[in-house]
């Protein structure tokens, strides 16, 4: 039975490594993860308003302050 536990553990590690140990939707730049904390200010790509990362809407590499500023 412990063989099954080992197999499960190996699968868990493989899945963990596949996702880089973090949530993949947040961003692709792993090294900037430290500086891009929740309080980092980013500029809205549409109106130029500065909002914190956690309040902004991020699409690709661009940030938007609200749904009104999202591109269609
Ligand atoms: Zn905006």
Image: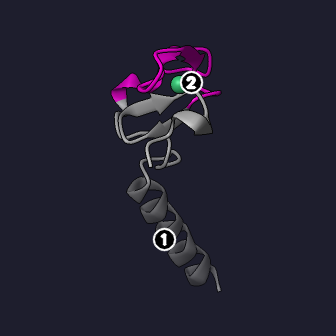
Query: Which stretch is magenta?
Result: 31-56
Residue on which disc 1 sits:
11
Q: Report whether 39 appears left or right of 19.
A: right
Q: Vertical placement of 71 versus 2: above or below?
A: above
Q: Residue at 53% of width from left, 14% of height from top?
A: 49
Residue reaching furthest to the bottom: 1
Q: Vertical placement of 1 versus 64: above or below?
A: below
Foreground: 71 or 33? 71
- Crowdedness near tag 2: few (<14), some (14–19) or many (≥20) residues, C-alpha within 10 Å: some
Rendered location of residue 25, percent (x, y): 49, 48
Q: SS at mark 2?
A: loop
Which marked residue is nearer to the observer: mark 1 or mark 2?
2
Q: Residue at 46% of width from left, 15% of height from top?
A: 48
Rendered location of residue 9, percent (x, y): 55, 67
Residues under labels 1 and 2: Cα distance? 33 Å
Rendered location of residue 65, percent (x, y): 57, 26
Foreground: 23 or 70? 70
Q: Residue at 51% of width from left, 45% of height from top?
A: 22
Residue on which disc 2 sits:
53
Q: Name the image quarter holding residue 18.
A: bottom left
């Amino acid at each position: 039975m412990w063989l099954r536990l080992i197999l499960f553990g190996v699968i868990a590690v493989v899945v963990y490594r596949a996702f880089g140990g973090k949530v993949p939707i947040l961003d692709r730049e792993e090294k900037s993860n430290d500086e891009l904390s929740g309080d980092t200010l980013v500029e809205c790509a549409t109106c130029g308003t500065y909002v914190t990362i956690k309040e902004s809407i991020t699409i690709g590499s661009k940030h938007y302050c609200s749904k009104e500023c999202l591109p269609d």
